[in-house]
Image (tube, rainbow, N blue to C red):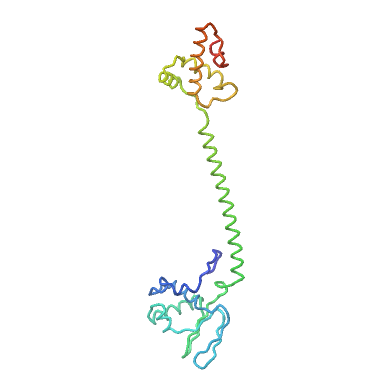
């Protein structure tokens, strides 16, 4: 019944919570209630004039008490206890004074050393999960960086795009020659890869205007290397 799925620390004070006291109990709630009622260490208490020894994992009760505690009929309590006995989940001993119930393999539910070992395993799993999560974060960052790189990659414009932009700017740049020029240069601006073709168009626009002014003044020299090559 117990497997490696781990454990939780459940305080007995949960029995004082309103949500726990709601009746009738479910079978699962009744079973957990029995685990909470069981003594976590050997104990002695006085029943009438008799000193009773109660072992770890056991507790003394009666069908009447459990019936009142769980909100069940005595018949349902008796049937449930018999079911647990048949499933080898509890041992039951009754006499005319009391009923002693013992949780079979109680240490599987309440063992300090087992709990410590499970806690260590849980912490290791948590750290491993955190490491994997960090790796996932790094992977996400890599993906994001790739996306940023992809978004910053230059896509050469079409002739129509350049022509439309030049018309919007009302400049005198020859869109066809502009596209042919930079296509032949592998879309390089000087020694760098072009990143903004509209900016390059505007640069040519200013350079062409400047060249026109220099030509009108008798000086045909331009300071732009690309423009010099373009007009040669």
Task: Name which residue lies at 44% across and 74% down.
Answer: 16
Residue 182: x %, y % from top left: 53, 19
**Vertical arrangement, residue 29 with respect to residue 201, above or below:** below
Residue occupying the point 51% across, 20% down: 203
Q: Split into 4 quadrants, where in the image is the C terminus?
A: top right
* Residue positioned 56% across, 77% down in the render: 40
Q: Which is more toward the observer, 187 or 108? A: 187
Looking at the image, which residue sits at the far bottom? 49
Query: Residue at 51% across / 94% down in the picture?
Result: 49
User: Which x, y percent locates residue 230?
Assistant: 54, 13
Q: How far from the left and from the top, in percent, is residue 98?
A: 47, 87
Looking at the rendering, which quadrant does residue 194 occupy? top right
Query: In the depicted view, which residue is nearer to us: 88 or 161?
Result: 161
Across and down, in percent, residue 138 comes to 57, 45
Which residue lies most toward the top here?
A: 218
Establish if 16 lies above or below 186.
Answer: below
Q: In front: 44, or 102?
A: 44
Against 202, residue 1 (above or below) is: below
Q: Is residue 47 above or below residue 140?
A: below
């Amino acid at each position: 019944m117990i497997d490696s799925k781990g454990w939780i620390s459940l305080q007995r004070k949960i029995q004082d919570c309103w949500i726990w006291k709601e009746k009738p109990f479910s079978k699962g709630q009744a079973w957990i209630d029995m685990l909470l009622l069981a003594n976590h260490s050997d104990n002695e208490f006085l029943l009438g004039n008799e000193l009773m020894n109660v072992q770890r994992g056991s507790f003394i009760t009666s069908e009447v008490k459990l019936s009142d505690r769980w909100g069940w009929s005595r018949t349902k309590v008796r049937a449930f206890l018999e079911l647990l006995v048949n499933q080898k989940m509890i041992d039951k001993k009754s006499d005319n004074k009391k009923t002693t119930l013992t949780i079979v393999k109680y240490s599987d539910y309440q063992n300090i050393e087992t709990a410590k070992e499970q806690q260590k395993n849980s912490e290791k799993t948590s750290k491993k999960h955190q490491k994997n999560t960090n790796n996932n974060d790094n992977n996400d960052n890599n993906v994001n960086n790739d996306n940023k790189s992809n978004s910053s990659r230059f896509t050469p414009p079409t002739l129509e795009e350049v022509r439309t932009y030049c018309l919007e700017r009302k400049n005198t740049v020859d869109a066809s020659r502009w596209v042919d020029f930079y296509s032949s240069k592998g879309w390089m601006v000087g020694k760098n890869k072009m990143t903004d073709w509209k900016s390059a168009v505007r640069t040519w626009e200013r350079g062409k205007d400047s060249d026109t002014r220099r030509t009108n003044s008798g000086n045909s020299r331009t300071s732009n290397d690309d423009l010099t090559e373009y007009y040669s």
